[in-house]
Image (cartoon, rainbow, N blue to C red):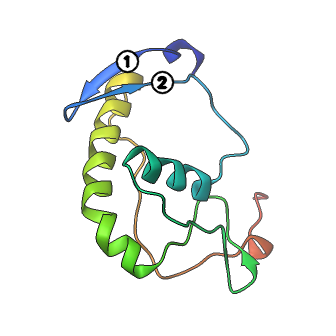
């Protein structure tokens, strides 16, 4: 939402700043890798599994990396969700869930 661009919201002891950008080419693997870097960790994050690309809203990390970082990551996600709700006056914010069920891009369609 362009109206929120540059707006800062404090939540969970952090300041979240809106870029005001909504991207049609969002890629969760890139987002997650960037999020981990902000947390101070360089972690491999993949957008494919077994040679097949995942849908843009899924990513893969090793189990050991996830076990090591998930608690800190989930805490920051709760803070970010709170900031999102405040910033956009919404009753809920985006949720990130752990799953072992990959959805492959070659089976995904946006057609209804």
Of the two numbered discs 2 and 1 on the same chain, state the one appearing first in sequence.
1
Please determine whether, in this image, residue 49 is positioned above or below residue 36: below
Q: Residue furthest bottom?
A: 50
Tell me residue 82's x, y (percent).
Answer: 28, 36
Q: State which quadrant residue 58 falls in.
A: bottom right
Please determine whether, in this image, residue 98 is positioned above or below residue 100: above
Name the foreground residue: 11 vs 3: 11
Residue at coordinates 80% horizontally, 74% vertically from top-left? 106
Residue at coordinates 31% horizontally, 74% vertically from top-left? 67
Judged left or right of residue 107, residue 5 is: left
Tell me residue 36's x, y (percent).
Answer: 44, 53
Please determine whether, in this image, residue 39 is positioned above or below residue 10: below
Inter-mark Cα distance, 2 to 1: 7 Å
Tell me residue 62's x, y (percent).
Answer: 47, 78
Judged left or right of residue 105, residue 82 is: left
Residue at coordinates 34% horizontally, 39% vertically from top-left? 80
Q: How many marks?
A: 2
Q: State which quadrant residue 21 falls in.
A: top right
Residue at coordinates 48% horizontally, 58% vertically from top-left? 42
Judged left or right of residue 54, residue 11 is: left
Judged left or right of residue 26, residue 112 is: right
Quadrant containing the N terminus is top right
Q: Local crowd at mark 2 within 10 Å, few (<14), some, or many (≥20)?
A: some
Q: Local crowd at mark 1 within 10 Å, few (<14), some, or many (≥20)?
A: some
Tell me residue 76's x, y (percent).
Answer: 30, 46
Name the foreground residue: 37 vs 74: 37
Residue 18 is labelled as: 2
According to the image, label 1 marks what residue? 8
Kindly indicate whether the residue at mark 1 contacts the one at mark 2 (C-beta within 8 angstroms): yes
Q: Residue furthest left?
A: 13
């Amino acid at each position: 939402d362009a109206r929120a661009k540059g707006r800062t919201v404090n939540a969970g002891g952090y300041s979240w700043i809106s870029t005001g950008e909504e991207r049609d080419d969002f890629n969760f693997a890139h987002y997650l890798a960037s999020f981990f870097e902000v947390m101070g960790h360089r972690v491999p994050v993949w957008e494919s599994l077994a040679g097949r690309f995942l849908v843009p809203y899924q990513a893969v990390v090793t189990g050991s990396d996830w076990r090591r970082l998930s608690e800190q990551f989930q805490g920051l996600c709760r803070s970010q969700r709170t900031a999102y709700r405040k910033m956009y006056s919404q009753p809920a914010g985006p949720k990130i869930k752990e799953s072992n069920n990959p959805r492959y891009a070659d089976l995904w369609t946006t057609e209804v």
